[in-house]
Amino acid sequence: MTNKLKCGINLSRLSDKDIECGVCKICIAKSKLIYPFQRDLKTSRQLVDALKGYIETNTGYKCKNTEIDKNPDIVVFDIIDTTNPKGELICRVEAKMLEGYAFMKAEQLLADHLKPKETLVVDEPKLISYFECVKNDLRYHGRSVPIYIVWKFDRPCADLGGITVFQEIKILKDIHDKRGNNRSFERKTVDSDIVNGVKRGVTAKYHFSLRECRPIEELIQEINSL
């Protein structure tokens, strides 16, 4: 998947017309109420591995999986002291794989009326945990540690499907603080959310726009400048 991490478009110049759904009818307004938790977990792991390879290939840094469940997936670090195998923390990266249909009722159900085609989703409890991670890093490391959320936008759209975008957590927090509940939505709990009798699927969702993000091609430059 590493060589497929690309965007190739200027997200800031996407117009309302660019994000209007056409006549393909691939996505439908009525959900099939199928949210395959185990499949999503597998594809998310594949994206994590691809991002680790992408970052290590294009920077002088190393990557490892987080050891704290609520923290972002990837820890990026620099081994400048061979006696310290943990190295210096550079940044954190979270991988979000968006497969399947667009959120066709976004304009109707979100107060901000985002277009289905532009909508990026995050589990809201996870988003809040990333905000907390920023505070914890500041306390523990004495400095602000960047967190980047990366979305692989694997929607079936002929024009925007397959692109990868990212944004830094401070920008996303500013949007979250400003827009509040206008971007929140709680979907129904379905059978596939339950694994061995425990609810594993997260139903509280928060939404951002493609136009609020940056192309993946800029992530390496961003990390290398830290």
Image (cartoon, rainbow, N blue to C red):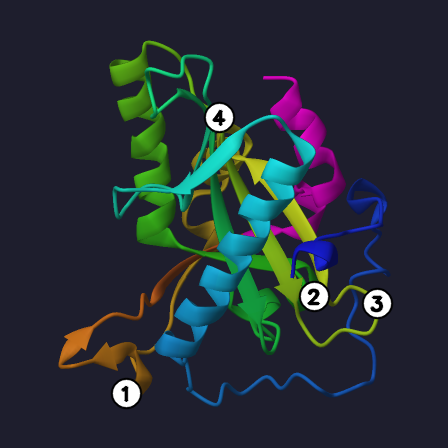
Q: Nearer the viewer, residue 161 or 125?
A: 161
Is 220 magenta? The answer is: yes
Mark 4 vs 3, N-terminal side: 4
Q: Which residue is mark 2?
A: 117
Mark 3 vs 2, N-terminal side: 2
Mark 1 vs 4, N-terminal side: 4
Q: Which residue is mark 4?
A: 146
Extent of the magenta region: 208-226
Q: Which residue is mark 1?
A: 191
Q: Is most of the magenta stretch helix, strand or loop?
A: helix
Q: Position of residue 157 (x, y in %)?
A: 76, 73
Q: Residues within 10 Å of mark 2 (few under 14, many from 20)?
A: many
Q: Quadrant of residue 85?
A: top left
Mark 4 vs 2, N-terminal side: 2
Q: Residues within 10 Å of mark 4 (few under 14, many from 20)?
A: some
Q: Position of residue 18 (x, y in %)?
A: 85, 60
Q: Residues within 10 Å of mark 1 (few under 14, many from 20)?
A: few
